[in-house]
Amino acid sequence: MNLPDLLRRWDAFDSQQFPSDQTDLRSFETFAAMAYAKLVEGRKLDMRDVQLLWHCQDGLSKALGSLAGPASAYFAELEALVRLAIGQASTDPSVFATVVAVELKELLDRRVRECLSGKADDFPAILVATINLVADVLRGPISLSPDPDKTREALLRSTGEQLRVTVERFTQPAQA
């Protein structure tokens, strides 16, 4: 679905009455509306927006099983719109990277909760899992290269620099 069609669908949804007996789900609608406001203004969704939408989609999909009637239809449409907004945002390569990073981080966090204690002792295993993913992603271009050794070295330099920049950006104190 293209962006203008998505925004029209949001406008149609937004004109509906919020189910008054579902106030505990209002935050999902509020967060989705904030993301849609950015899209209407022509702005890109950032990491925080994607994380909020991802949590909205996750929470809505869990809540849908316990809803009935008009509330079920209302929140099913909201969940679909959130999913479409994430998908629409993902067509931009820089936002695609953010969406996939959020999804992978959520999966990693879930696996840590399921399998590990979540204590500092688990950090090496978490880091190795992440490094294994990066290595697997790099394996494709390296194996297809006419000069795998040169490509490996170039990708390792590039990946190391990108990692340094990203860690610095993620660990900078919040600007007031």
Image (cartoon, helix red, strand yellow):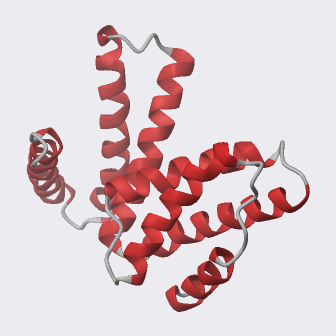
Dividing the picture into quadrants, the one containing residue 128 is top left
Whether 144 is drawn above or below 39: the answer is above
Asked if 165 appears above or below 12 in the picture, the reply is above
Front residue (pair 7, 107): 7
Please provide percent x and percent y for residue 113.
51, 20
- Image: 16 above or below 51: below
Report the quarter where the N terminus lies: bottom right
Judged left or right of residue 76, residue 112 is left
Residue at (44, 44) in percent of width and height:
104
Q: Position of residue 162 (x, y in %)?
A: 14, 53
Residue at screen point 54% across, 87% down: 2
Residue 62: horizontal and vertical position, in percent?
Answer: 71, 42
- Left or right placement of residue 69 versus residue 7 in this view: right
Residue 140 shows in the view: no
Closest to the observer: 110 or 51? 51
Q: Which of the 4 image quarters holds residue 34?
A: bottom left
